[in-house]
Amino acid sequence: MKNRKPTLSLLGLFTCFTLIFTTVYAQEDDPGKSGKVEAAYLKETEQLAKNKQIQKAFQSISAQKKRNREELIMLTEIPAPPFMETKRGERFASMLKEAGIDSVWTDKVGNVIGLRKGKKRNRTVAFDAHLDTVFPLETDVKVKVKGDTLFAPGIGDNTQGVVMIVSVLRALEEAKIETDADVLFIGSVGEEGLGDLRGVKYLFTDQSPHIDSWIAIDGGGMDYLRTMGLGSYRYRVTFKGPGGHSWGAFGLANPQHALGSAIHYFSKVADKFTRTGARTSYNVGRIGGGTSVNSIAFESWMEIDMRSEIPENLNLVDSLLKASVQQALQEHNAMKRMGPALTVEIKKIGDRPSGELPESLPLIQRAMAAVTFLGVSPKVGRGSTNSNTPIAKGIPAVTLGRGGKGGNAHALNEWWYDDEGYKAIQIALLTLVSEAGMVNP
């Protein structure tokens, strides 16, 4: 950490500790593997970076540091839970207009899209960051500043990504860089939680402009590129019964008891299944139901998240969940002494596709070459981001890191500070221009 005041040494130590801790337990804990960049792409990137216009764009990015910080604070303090991104989206749209985008619109599901026309207009490259955060509307999102560190829910994931989108656009405009392909600058909705990638899923339907390549900003370090999609299924399972008094109606089938058995049976079989083969995970994240300690619940529910590197394992752990739920239902209906039988509803509330792209793909090579040019060794790995959808469809896609330093993503004490954050923005610009093609480089 550079230029930190001595009085902040304890804060710096705490920040380093929480970064280490959250790296172990965060979504991005896939360590990835070292990427191998082909010499031709390294040469292409080095030549592009020497271009006077690119150098001017780099200078523009460096000069935007203060403005980017101010806009990061401003956007962070606009709440944006999934399905409630409108206000942040409106501010993002105005920022695109101020930066000089050709046209801006908001689509049917709420994605904010800005078009920067290319010279040839023969291809379309999308450049995306998701607008939403995981936090409910009532969350206190006021940014607290301690030294050079910003603390607030969503400050990094993914508000910093949104700021980077606009910063790249400004740099392109100020340096008068023209691309062959059209570029869509996108603030997408519904990436987090029950948003279930709804924004990016809509962007890859026939109701949206055709996209040939996809570049997203999400995740942490600028060295880590997500080129593989981590698939997931999410369910809400609800047991229902008549309910009643814990004494007077004793003997009725109890939804809470059935739910407990379902969790037990599922965790036993899923534990055994996930100990071998492709990495697969399962988690009962939320449970609820009941009205009081002396009432038999009329409803009991749980929400489950299951993930796997390969679709086959995801489907298998899915079948284990459903079998466990049915086992619990039948067992507790057989135990009842009176009244109607329990029923159960198994509702899918999330479906993120999986897939992998070859490291030799030009877009991935260009991204790795850009990372290498900025002095960092690139890694490629798996994640659950907006890139999942294009990856699953076989469309060239990569998710770039936000850079800087940060930690505690998805927590109320999330933090970020600008430790050479300009480099991540320059990587994004290089990758975008390489993929979109520069006119007269």
Image: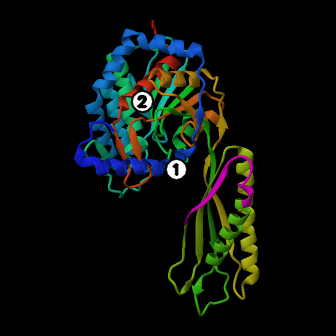
> How many angstroms separate mark 1 from mark 2 (CA)?
22 Å
The image quadrant that residue 176 belongs to is top left
Residue at horizontal 60%, vertical 24%? 36
Residue at horizontal 41%, vertical 50%? 17
Q: Which residue is mark 1?
A: 24
Q: Earlier in the sequence, mark 1 or mark 2?
A: 1
- Relative to 69, 153 lies left or right: right
Q: Does 207 appear above or below 247?
A: above
- Camera-side residue: 160 or 45? 45
| Residue 24 point in image, percent of width and height | 52, 50
| Residue 137 point in image, percent of width and height | 38, 55
Q: Which residue is mark 2?
A: 424
- Quadrant placement of the N terminus: top left
Which residue type carries mark 2?
Ala
Residue 362 included in the magenta stretch of the image = no
Mark 1 vs mark 2: in front = 1
| Residue 383 point in image, percent of width and height | 57, 41
- Relative to 286, 88 lies left or right: left
